[in-house]
Image: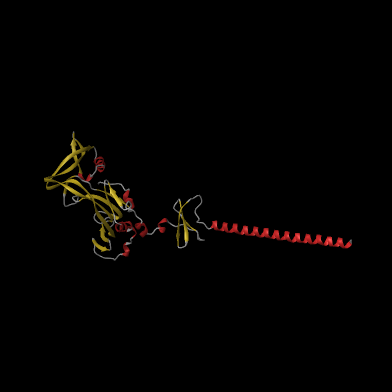
Amino acid sequence: MKSIVKITLLIVVLILSISFVSANENITAEQSDLLETSLHETNLTNTVEEEPLSAENEYVLTTTIINDNIYAVTNNNTYTSTNETIYTITSDSLLTYADEVEQSSTADRTFKMGKYKITLSKSQYSILLYAKQKDIEDYEEYSNINSYNKYGPYTVLKHYNHSFDNYEKGLVYYIKKYTGKTVKQKIGYGFKGYKYIAKKTFTTKAKAEKYKKTLKYSYKYVIKKVKVKNKVRYRVYKQVSKFKKVVTKNAKVYIRIQYGAGQSGQPEKYTMGLYSQYENPGYELVSGDIFCYKISNNFKGLKTAKTRYN
């Protein structure tokens, strides 16, 4: 009987030992699974933190990779890097000059004045677009006064500025293109003098000059002192040339875009002018004037600059 009891107790102890070992193995497996899950989540977190950085409350428009660094372009045109050193760069540094010209559309290179327009080639567009970035000191020095020296597409001008009593020099470049349109203009031959058509009378010369400035092509108007009821007045007249012969012409219309001074520009500025083949000192234009121009500190600004007639 005692032997049976001992055998029974031994079997119970054995069963309990097996159960304890199995429980320990299950606990170890669960801990291992939890550890792997934790490590996986940590890797995912690290991956998210490496995304492009941008300023607070800004949404990312595009991303650009430069020299293995990712730059995020945000809604206020700032650029931030994923590199350890965070810094801001300008949009110009992301697009090279050559890229901007190459990516320019026909619309970008088209310039209008009223109903007339021209389209520049990419080469012409490039030379005008970056003329202001060219340093005059990079070009060869020379000593001739009031002279033009040619360097590549640019002309180098040196002249004496009487207003500042010194020498000035600068780059000049221009293109002239036919718009493909013509306009009817009357050209005079055999000048006979002027006739004057009264416009308006003022009590002071200052008022007369102010009014004259408001007139289109004001250079065609003059101010004369007159007497009205024994009082001195100032009258604005339109000065009209008289000729022995007047001929009507179909004149070609051109647009000229220029950087720099020269004969029709301004130092370090852009000008754009509309004119016909007969609007120059070689002809006497009686009627049909179309001449007008624009001035801008930058090339693209010519598209929206105010049109001037005086």
Q: Position of residue 281 (x, y in %)?
A: 18, 52
Query: For this rendering, which residue is in front, 158 or 68?
Result: 68
Q: Quadrant of residue 151?
A: bottom left
Q: Position of residue 129 (x, y in %)?
A: 33, 56
Q: Quadrant of the N terminus?
A: bottom right
Q: Position of residue 193 (x, y in %)?
A: 13, 45
Q: Position of residue 251 (x, y in %)?
A: 18, 49
Q: Quadrant of residue 221?
A: top left
**Relative to residue 246, is residue 46 depicted above or below?**
below
Q: Is residue 66 left or right of residue 267?
A: right
Residue in the image at 62% along x and 57% along y: 37
Q: Specify whether residue 165 is in view.
A: no
Query: For this rendering, which residue is in front, 264 or 291?
Result: 291
Q: Specify whether residue 227 is in view.
A: yes
Residue in the image at 55% along x and 58% along y: 47
Query: For this rendering, which residue is in front, 291 or 147?
Result: 291
Instruction: Specify the color scheme.
Output: secondary structure
Query: For this rendering, which residue is in front, 91 or 41?
Result: 41
The tally of labels here is 0
Q: Is residue 265 left or right of residue 90?
A: left
Residue in the image at 32% along x and 64% along y: 138
The residue most toward the top is 229
Residue in the image at 27% along x and 58% along y: 173
Q: Is residue 242 left or right of residue 55?
A: left
The residue most toward the right is 1
